[in-house]
Image (spheres, rainbow, N blue to C red):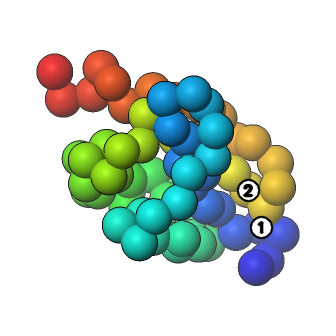
């Protein structure tokens, strides 16, 4: 993965990283593309048991964790 690639880290209710076949490990060339994907897919991500997400650029945190609990209510 490129050092400049953006990825989402998925966290469970205890704040631990979580993975699942329902949670794609995608990389994005820009923050805007990562955010656009998440804007379309957040409901599926939440339904897969994710409590919060963190946006990463390489290994650096861009922002997060961002709770999904209040989204869509």
Percent from the top left, x then y, of residue 48?
32, 52
Up-down relation of residue 26 to residue 23 (above or below):
below
Name the residue rendered at 81%, 48% in the picture: 60
* Residue 19 horizontal/vertical position (percent): 53, 60
N-terminal-most mark, 1 or 2: 1
**Which residue is painted at 64% across and 39% down in the image?**
16
In what quadrant of the picture does the C terminus appear?
top left
Extreme residue toward the bottom, this view:
1
Q: Which quadrant does the N terminus fall into?
A: bottom right
- Picture residue at 61% right of the left edge, 61% below the top: 7
Name the residue beneath numbered marker 1: 4
Q: Is residue 45 in view?
A: yes
Q: Is residue 65 left or right of residue 58?
A: left
**As displayed, is residue 29 above or below residue 33?**
below
Marks 1 and 2 close (CB-CB < 8 Å): yes
Q: Which residue is mark 2?
A: 57
Q: Quadrant of residue 61?
A: top right
Crowding around mark 2 (Cα neighbors within 10 Å: few <14, some 14 to 19, many 20+) is many
In space, the residues marked 1 and 2 are separated at their CA atoms by 6 Å
Q: Position of residue 22 (x, y in %)?
A: 35, 67
- Residue 52 position, x and y percent, is 48, 35
């Amino acid at each position: 993965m490129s050092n400049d690639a953006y990825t989402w880290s998925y966290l469970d209710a205890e704040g631990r990283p979580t993975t699942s076949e329902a949670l794609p490990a995608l990389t994005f060339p820009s923050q805007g593309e990562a955010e656009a994907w998440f804007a379309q897919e957040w409901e599926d991500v939440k339904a897969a048991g994710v409590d919060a997400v963190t946006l990463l650029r390489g290994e650096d945190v861009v922002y997060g964790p961002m709770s999904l609990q209040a989204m869509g209510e």
